[in-house]
Amino acid sequence: MRPRRRALVTIVTLAALAAVPVIAGLAYQPFYLDLFRRIMIFAIAAVSLDIILGYGGMVSLGHAAYLGIGAYAVAVPALHGIHSAWLQWPLAMALSGLAALLIGAVSLRTSGVYFIMITLAFAQMLYYIGISIEPWGGDDGMRLAGRSQLGGPLDLGDPHVFYYVVLALLAALLLVGERVVEARFGTVIRAVKSNEARLQAIGVASFRYKLAAFVLAGAVCGLAGALLANQTEYLTPSFMHWTRSGDIIVMVILGGMGTLVGPVLGAAALLLLEHVLSAWTVHWQVILGPLLVLVVLYARGGLSSVLPGVGARHG
Amino acid sequence: MAEPLLAVRGLRKRFGGLVATDGVDLEVAEGEALAIIGPNGAGKTTLIGQLSGDVRPDAGTIRFAGADVTALPAAARSHRGLARSFQITSIFREFTALDNVALAVQAHAGHSFRFWRSARAEAVLREPARVILAQVGLEGRADVVAGTLAHGEQRQLEIAMALATRPRLLLLDEPVAGMGADESQRMVQLLRALRGRHTIVLVEHDMDVVFALADRISVLVYGRVIATGAPETIRLDAEVRRAYLGEEVPG
């Protein structure tokens, strides 16, 4: 509701993220640069999931699969001496999009619990394939041979440059996402969630639109995977593990489904909580669990609904 | 052109042991208003569902506008000019009234693979939607979230969405169900205005509504059409009275 207020929260969020390196520098805490870059990368993944989960009502429990495919699309070419981001990143998006096309073409024929289980099954299948490919590190994973190269002054080896590249991509995603969900395409996707039988009765063959949204979300998450490989400088099949898919869902729900900027806040909240709580105890998830329950019970619109004027509802 | 707009032959649908549609034949001429009446459980909604494409028949054919549409899904039938309203109100509750109708316009204005321009800024969708909202008497409620409209208004909105698809045939499943007397009256006036301009197949319990709107009536009992005829004929038909009308229509 009230897109103008939501735009305001988006701008404030992006401005705050832009200020992080400055503050981290003043406080002599370069670690925070690393932490918030990680937050933004997962935010990109969470925003991509929000398009199908929050707007389209498609509960995919296999979204981490694309994170993994994107990471492989960086690490494997790097292994063979191909470091150009202009090759790796489009490849990450293309392969993830293709995987989403195949997974979606099957799973979108089901709904509800079946859809959740099939997307989960596909992602776990990819996870086990990743484990079994020894030349690419198998179970242990492998070090990234080198970060992606954008060329010119954009050296991802520089933590600040890398940070602002990720921020720019996140900002672009939020801007484009905002247009897409309000355009004809997004209207159909929101209508799928609202009342798919009605949508078909007025003449929209909804399957193709759901599949297209699924592919778009997969491709964007693949880009997040490519960034994640650069972030960790390590490739591991555990990027694709189903618990990772669960994390991304938690980010979306925690931040507020169907709000785009909400999942950014959700990613920040989850990863900051993990950071703070895991300093206290290795059993930090024992504290996180009840917190999540409270959010679902008392702030169903997520964090962004607690902020004034940023509801999940579309008016 | 003697062929009827809608021709149903030998339609059958069985749910387990229950025969919901048992060899139904129907013909509806262009411009006609046919009412289907019958006791609860006669299979009226199942029949409408098969006509709209939401329910797959086990046997029989449905011809619409000169083509066999039996195997077509609902969305494809909508593009051939079939529109339905649902017995249980079916709208996009989170959308505004205008957004609901504009989406129905959009569904018939080319594909929806458009990613940049706000659909709310597209006059080609909004203007026709406003005209149709006014036609059903909801012009003052355009920006109200549909789920918060009064029940009768939601039913009017359903009609508006059906009209926005520019249908040749309107399938109306109990359009006055659950309405108060005033709301019901308004709906009948609205449907009267549509009569003649659109071909109508109407399922309805309320006999006043049926007799106010229908050119012809078919009586459905246990999935079979036991009588079809002009309203006066049906009113006087002994078998129909025994099966159904008995208490509801005095004399």
Image (cartoon, rainbow, N blue to C red):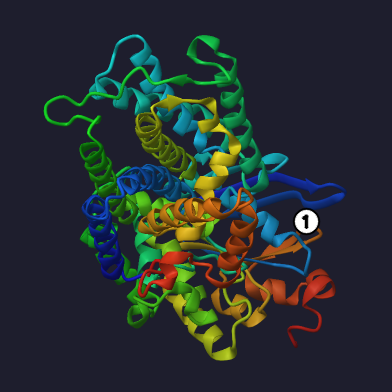
- Residue B96 x, y percent position in the rendering: 39, 71
Whether B9 is drawn above or below B176: the answer is above
Front residue of this view, candidates A34 and A306: A34
Residue at 27% from the left image edge and 50% from the top image edge: A28
Identify which residue is drawn at 37% across, 42% down. A41
The answer to whether A146 is drawn above or below residue A154 in the figure is above
| Image coordinates for residue A132, horizontal then vertical, percent | 59, 15
| As drawn, B172 above or below A274 | below
Q: Residue B87 occupies which quadrant of the picture?
A: bottom right
Residue A191 seen: yes
Quarter of the image that includes the C terminus of chain B: bottom right
Q: Looking at the image, which residue is at 77% across and 72% down?
A: B237
Side (left or right) of A215 relative to A78: right
Residue ranking furthest to the front: A28
Residue at the farthest right position? B17
| Chain under numbered label 1 | B
Which amino acid is tagged 1?
A: Gly
Q: Which residue is mark 1?
A: B223
Residue A255 image position (x, y, % from top left): 45, 59
